[in-house]
Image (cartoon, rainbow, N blue to C red):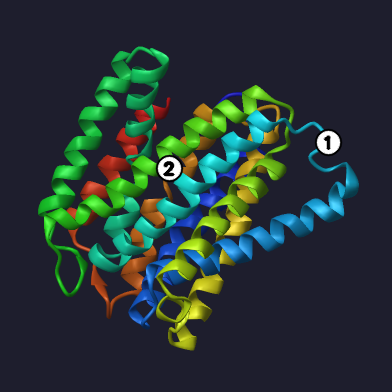
Amino acid sequence: MTGVTLEVLALALVPAVLWGFAPIFDKRGMAAGGGSVQASLVVVVVDSLLYWLVIAVRHGRTAFSGLSLEVFVTFAFAGVVGTAIGRITIFVGVDRVGASINSAILSTRPLFATLIALVFLGEPLGPVTGVGIVVLVAGLSILTVATGGDLGGWQPRALLWPLAAAATFAVANVSRRYGMLAGSISALEAVAINETAGLVVLLAYAIATGPRAVLDRPPESYRYFLGSGLVTTVAMLSLMAALGLDDGRIAIVDPLVATAPLFTILFAAVFLRDLERVTRGVVSGGVLVVVGAALITI
């Protein structure tokens, strides 16, 4: 941690804590009768509006002045994959297996990102990465046989939902990395394009499948998803702020943010006692997944 300021550490821990708490809102919203598309729409509408508001205040007419078509398409693609498809699979996962287990499995994202980089970018796998993969897989194995999560029970195949979410986020993050390197664009502008593209796709899907069937949900569920959207907005801005600092290295920031599942397990044990159980197997598996993801990232 030498040379790392407390400001970076604090800014990186903020999204870890907030993204650890967001699944609590998500689980409550789903339990109140909410749906995955509805939840995704509410969250993306909230953060998109706030991002565009900040851009209007900070940049005004100078916003997106250096934007190229290639960079725009890159972040739009990331929004379709990560924000639209990824968010839907997240909410289905929270509903099927529970907030604690879903959040832990989402931390497998670095594994998918590493495999994508290996295949398409030719990046080699180092020994630490190999150890991280072994530890991460061990954590997944423990979670598969753990008797925790949703009180209604779940089948091992339901883990495919959070794994699919992790894979979509990995594809989106590789695309975002390429976009940031390919042109001159601020992190805030990139996030705005990303979320807006996802919002367009979600709205199109809702219209095609029948808006009432998607959005005609109990009012209480909307309140929970609104809370999730506000938490997500602050978490993302804090993450971007941490990465924007001189000493905000990925090797420091990303592992700290990846501790979010540990906070989710803690919050679930306190706030979701009537909906899911947190067992020793869930805690052990979650810790191993986080450690494995951190090793892969580093």
The residue depicted at 55 percent of the width and 34 percent of the height is 176
Residue 50, given in percent of the width and then of the height, sits at 70, 61
Numbered disc in front, either 1 or 2: 1
Residue type, numbered disc 1:
Ser
Foreground pick, 7 / 107: 107
Total labels: the figure holds 2
The residue depicted at 37 percent of the width and 63 percent of the height is 91
Residue that extends furthest to the front in the rendered view of this protein: 208
The quadrant in which the C terminus is found is top left
**Vertical order, 226 against 44 (above or below):** below
**Vertical order, 206 against 241 (above or below):** below
Foreground pick, 294 / 2: 294
Query: Quarter of the image holding residue 75?
Result: top right
**Vertical order, 121 against 217 (above or below):** above
Verify CB contact (< 8 Å) between mark 1 and mark 2: no
Instruction: Specify whether 141 is left or right of 202.
Output: left
Instruction: Specify whether 179 is left or right of 172.
Output: right
Q: Secondary structure at mark 1?
A: loop
Residue type, numbered disc 2:
Phe
Q: Earlier in the sequence, mark 1 or mark 2?
A: 1
Q: Secondary structure at mark 2?
A: helix
Residue 207, given in percent of the width and then of the height, sits at 49, 70
**Vertical order, 96 against 280 (above or below):** below
Residue 188, given in percent of the width and then of the height, sits at 70, 44
Classed neighbour count for the residue bearing mark 1: other residues with Cα under 10 Å, few (<14), some (14–19), many (≥20): few
Residue at label 1? 65
Residue that extends furthest to the bottom in the rendered view of this protein: 219
Task: Inspect this view and state whether residue 249 appears.
Answer: no
The mark found on residue 169 in the picture is 2
The residue depicted at 33 percent of the width and 19 percent of the height is 119
The residue depicted at 70 percent of the width and 25 percent of the height is 183
Foreground pick, 136 / 68: 68
